């Protein structure tokens, strides 16, 4: 897969914040008007000074793994809330660059609009990849929400600065909700639907769950269209 190279990654935190503010104006929030058949999950894990990224493409509705990829890089960015794209973006782009499959949408372990500058990991990489992107995280980033009803599919708005920037979505009845936010070329309703359709009985969407396992080293990288 090819992707855009819009900027350098070796920026200072102050430069990175300014870049996020600039690029956030290019994010498109709109319904996804095509049928979603291939959903990618993207996640990263740290082992000492190494960050391992993983991307897994899953076919819906059968949840078959179509293709997966792993890449590693030295950790070059410190832990900075709100700037995870600079810490994990390069290694995840390495993974996408090796994919032969172009997914219809990507679910990132992170945020989209639910971010102090409205430009989380899902927005940043969605913009670079030119793909519809959704953020799916365990906790909100500098935002609050009311607990949704206990049934699967229930949700409540996540609000920040007087705006709805995401949803606390119950993907499985009786379990803790996930925080869903549109990243790029999706809207909140589309993002909720994609996450629910991608959940195969677990709290976490299946593409993201498999990417998490692969990044941890407990899965394996599967060639494209392996039976």
Image: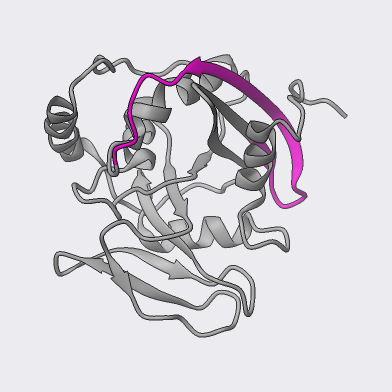
In the picture, measured across the screen, residue 88 lies left or right of residue 80, that is right
Residue extending furthest front?
48
Q: Tell me if residue 59 can be seen.
A: yes
Q: Position of residue 178 (x, y in %)?
A: 50, 63
In the picture, measured across the screen, residue 154 lies left or right of residue 87, that is right
Q: Which residues are magenta?
A: 57-80
> Residue 163's quadrant in the figure?
bottom left
Q: Position of residue 6 (x, y in %)?
A: 25, 18
Q: Tell me if residue 37 can be seen.
A: no
Residue found 60% across the figure and 76% down from its top: 152
In the picture, measured across the screen, residue 11 lies left or right of residue 88, that is left
> Residue 200's quadrant in the figure?
bottom right
- The image's colouring method is one colour
Residue found 49% across the figure and 45% down from its top: 109
Residue extending furthest right?
227
- Is 126 magenta? The answer is no
Looking at the picture, tell me which residue is in the foreground, 21 or 87: 87
Looking at the picture, tell me which residue is in the foreground, 209 or 37: 209
Residue found 60% across the figure and 45% down from its top: 208
> Residue 189's quadrant in the figure?
bottom left
Q: Position of residue 207 (x, y in %)?
A: 64, 44
Q: Position of residue 113 (x, y in %)?
A: 29, 52
Q: Is residue 133 above or below residue 198?
A: above
Looking at the picture, tell me which residue is in the foreground, 110 or 191: 110
**Quadrant assignment for the C terminus:** top right
In the picture, measured across the screen, residue 135 lies left or right of residue 72, that is left
């Amino acid at each position: 897969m090819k992707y855009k190279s819009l900027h350098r990654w070796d920026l200072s935190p102050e430069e990175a914040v300014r870049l996020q503010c600039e690029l956030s104006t290019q994010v498109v929030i709109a319904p996804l008007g095509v049928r979603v058949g291939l959903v990618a999950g993207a996640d990263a894990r740290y082992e000492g000074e190494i960050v391992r990224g993983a991307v897994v493409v899953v076919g819906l509705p059968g949840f078959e793994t179509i293709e997966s990829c792993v890449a590693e890089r030295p950790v070059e960015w410190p832990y900075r809330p709100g700037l995870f794209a600079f810490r994990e973006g390069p290694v995840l782009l390495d993974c996408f660059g090796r994919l032969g499959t172009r997914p219809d949408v990507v679910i990132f372990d992170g945020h989209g609009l639910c971010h102090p500058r409205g430009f989380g990991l899902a927005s940043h990489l969605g913009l670079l990849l030119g793909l519809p992107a959704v953020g799916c995280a365990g906790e909100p980033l500098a935002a609050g929400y009311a607990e949704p009803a206990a049934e699967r599919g229930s949700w409540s708005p996540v609000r920040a600065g007087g705006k709805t920037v995401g949803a606390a979505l119950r993907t499985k009845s009786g379990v803790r909700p996930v925080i869903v936010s549109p990243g790029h070329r999706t809207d909140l309703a589309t993002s909720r639907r994609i996450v629910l359709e991608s959940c195969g009985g677990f709290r976490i969407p299946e593409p993201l769950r498999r990417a998490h396992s692969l990044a941890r080293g407990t899965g394996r990288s599967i060639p494209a269209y392996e039976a």
